[in-house]
Amino acid sequence: MANDPANALSNPLQRRDAEVLIGILAVLDGVIWGGSLDKWTTSKVAERLLQQSLLTADHNRDEVHQALNDLNQRLRYAVGDYDSPPSSPACPCLEGRWCRNRPIRKDVLASP
């Protein structure tokens, strides 16, 4: 999803609020990715992402993970962690590499 200036917020977001949201997104993504969040709550998160066109209707858990990762990266750009808007490369953990300093479990890679 590209950063469109026409879709910018009309009122600024406080830096501390954005930084808290970055942390919350990371925790939420971790518990969804790790399979420790119940299916109902995971589906509600996915539903919200779907409502904003950040997911397609036929999404799987990998795509929820990617959408949360992308959203987190855009928030990090907003607070100045990056000089330019982030692209949406596949998250390394979806390519079988490490995710947040932990090895990828094969049973987690399977979609629910």
Image: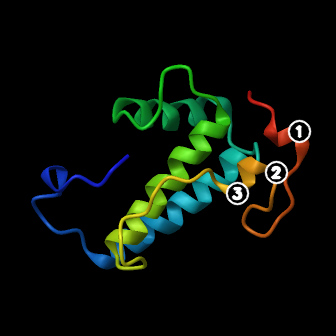
As drawn, is 104 to the left or to the right of 81? Answer: right
Characterize the local packing of mark 1: few (<14), some (14-19) or many (20 or more) Cα atoms within 10 angstroms. Answer: few
32 vs 78: above or below: above
Label annotation for residue 32: none
Amino acid type at mark 1 = Asp
As drawn, is 41 to the left or to the right of 72? Answer: right
Name the residue at 75% across, 49% down. Answer: 95
Label annotation for residue 96: 2
Q: Earlier in the sequence, mark 3 or mark 1?
A: 3
Label annotation for residue 92: 3
How far apart are the alpha carbons under marks 3 and 1? 17 Å
Amino acid type at mark 2 = Gly
Residue that carries the numbered disc 1 in the rendered image: 107
Secondary structure state at the residue bearing disc 3: helix
How far apart are the alpha carbons under marks 2 and 1? 12 Å
Name the residue at 59% across, 37% down. Answer: 63
Q: Earlier in the sequence, mark 2 or mark 1?
A: 2
**Contact? badges 3 and 1 (CB < 8 Å):** no
Amino acid type at mark 3 = Pro
